[in-house]
Amino acid sequence: MEPMSRRILVTAALPYANGPIHIGHLVEYIQTDIWVRFQKLRGNRCLYICADDTHGTAIMIRARQEGRSEEALIADMREQHIRDFSGFDIEFDHYGSTHSEENRRLCAQIWQSVTDAGLVVEKPVEQLYDPQAGTYLADRFVKGICPVCKSPDQYGDHCEKCLSNYTPKELIDPRSTLSGATPELREAPHRFIRLETLHAFLNEWTQSGRHLQPEIANYLKGHFLGDELRDWDVTRPPQYFGFEIPDFPGNYWYVWFDAPIGYIASTWQWCQQNQESLDDWWKSPDCEVHHFIGKDITYFHTLFWPGILKTAGFSLPTFVHIHGFLTVDGEKMSKSRGTFVQAETYLKHLDPSYLRYFFASKLSGKVDDLDLNVDEFKAKVDADLVGKVVNIASRCARFVAGGRLSDVYPADDRLFADAAAAGDRIAALFEACDYNAALREIMVLADRANQYIEANEPWKLRKDETQQDALRDVCTVGLNLFRQIAVYLAPVLPQLARQTATLLNSPIAHWDDAQTPLTGTPVSPFEHMLQRVDPGQVQKMIEDSKSSSPADAPAAVNPQSSSFDDGPEPLQQEPMTDAHCTIDDFIKVDMRVARVIAANHVEGADKLLQLTLSLGGDETRNVFAGIKSVYNPEQLIGRLVICCANLAPRKMRFGTSEGMVLASGSGGQDIYLLSPDSGAKPGMRVH
RNA sequence: CGCGCGGUGGAGCAGCCCGGUAGCUCGCGAGGCUCAUAACCUCGAGGUCGCAGGUUCGAAUCCUGCCCGCGCCA
């Protein structure tokens, strides 16, 4: 027994209250849940804290669209999230919400601290404003061309291509993703946090080698810490769903200011319910703070957040554990392929233990992306869990069902002792988040147990009346080896731990339960603990995921009525060209009727669909069209379009585009493909 | 272009930090067992460890250059 148990506060990133939990999210919550369960099993005091992230423009807009209050929306989502998490045996000690009184008060307190520290400055900001939606546009709701590297279709704050950070007004050719409208520049005062003041501290904290994975420390050093840190814009003018700032009336804290503070607020709620002191968890040097996040939100958690905590006198993170993204069959999750699987859909068809085990087998404590290959998923779960682990119990339990284990643990060629000795090594691997290596160690133990059973042939002993004691001894060894494995797997497979407890009538409550064999205890009748993965169910899940998704591609935002109410906006948005073109100029453009014979999503592209156009006969064109926001590939196949057939081929990031499909509209949700009246045939020229 | 990660028998990976018999899972071939959820056990075939240099008695492992793949706001 360890003399001192650690106190550990653990958080997973707060899921945004704008959508359901899907298997991509689950990587993180499962990874974290395993770590927390492991810590608790080791006898440490550990809290798993999470909450819904509820503020921001997206929530406001969605509530508006659904005709209800933001509060109603987020209450609903929170319920769904909690339901999904519990379905996967993800067990939070507390699940709060950033829209809570505790969070409001903490925000105010921390705001006061950073203000007192002289970190807050006010500056006028020209921000893009969506006149149609009636709101300023959050960075994520503006897309345009990156001012640094000129990549098209980048968000307003940050370029995916060159990883530069900038402000939305620097963006070239901006569009509102809410309405498709061209936003206008408006000026309003904002308040900023001077991160640069904390540069020396952040340098030291991130580069100490103790709080971050090395590749992350490297990344920060190369991308941010080499330059002056930018002031961070943390307030928003109306309209915005969030907390109004006490000393800055009419303005709101930016969602990224109050979201991480939600970690503390949620802990506070737990403290109030459990008569504990918040300071013991967030201001005590004896308490570790561990954050688990995806690599997408590295910046906020490794620079901004430590800076804030430091300034406000809260504990700094002991470690920020950063994981990669989930791919399915080597590709980004895709709605059309049915691999964008929601938690709820998964649970309708498959056992959550499968996913917990599979993710664990893929997680290594590195930032690498991890891939869920459907065949591998089945192979791994079937072979490891059913074929190896559960099989051990299945091979022994029947021979002693209704009876008891031997009163003295029999000689077993040191198998149990060796496996007990492996406990520390396996624990170290769990501690380091290298679940993949931990599971490999555990599977070696399972192999040995199966070998033992093979060598001792209990099925033969059973037939010999004089060998009944020997039979019970063999099963006692087999079941104890199984139980050891169940203990080591308990963080990953809590359900298996519960089943094992029932089978052997002894709870699994501590890691050290693997150190001492059970003897003399009754054995319950054996029941199957885990089924093999049913490929039919996997298929159904994928089908379900396909059908449930098109609905959530929202229709156009503006339900304009009246029959011929044609306004001047289109022309105002894009004035007509003055220069004439000659008939000869016009003839240069060879426009043809074409049929879409194949349409696919382009992985990595936000706007593009890849189309194969037939011009009749064998003549086809491969074309990339920026129409993904409005059209699904399925609905395009078979329809006629107009294409420019002699456009010079253009090499794009995703392949070569050999033409262009004609469409109108301003972009975003405002895109309309041109098509000929019925009767036209592919290949016909447009004159 | 940048940053990060990777390139090891058919597939997926470990080993690399701390140089010295190339290992695991699946698949494949042969055999065994028949207790177990067509599970389990044994044996076998199969690898120029991306390429080229360098350091060294010795390199998958260290150094340099190059090539290729993947990822980059969920």
Image (cartoon, coloured by chain):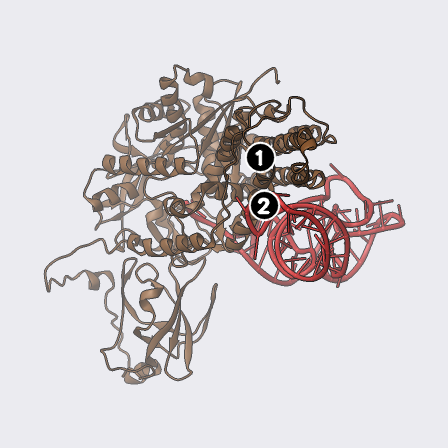
Chain colours: A brown, B red
Q: Is residue A504 left or right of residue A686?
A: right
Query: Looking at the image, is mark 2 or mark 1 nearer the viewer?
Result: 1
Q: Chain of mark 1?
A: A
Task: Residue at 23%, 79% (x, y): give it.
Answer: A678
Q: Nearer the viewer, residue A229 or A245?
A: A245
Locate the C terminus of chain A by quadrant: bottom left
Residue A575 visible in this rendered orientation of the protein = yes
Instruction: Residue A30: give x, y in percent of width and height.
Output: 48, 38
Q: Which residue is mark 2?
A: A387
Q: Nearer the viewer, residue B27 or A35?
A: B27
**Number of numbered markers:** 2
Q: Chain of mark 2?
A: A
Q: Is residue A125 left or right of residue A477?
A: left
Locate the N terminus of chain A by quadrant: top right
Marked residue nearer the N-terminal end (2 or 1) = 2
Residue A207 visible in this rendered orientation of the protein = no
Q: Callout 2 environment at 10 Å: few (<14), some (14 to 19), or many (20+)?
A: some
Q: Is residue A125 left or right of residue A463?
A: left
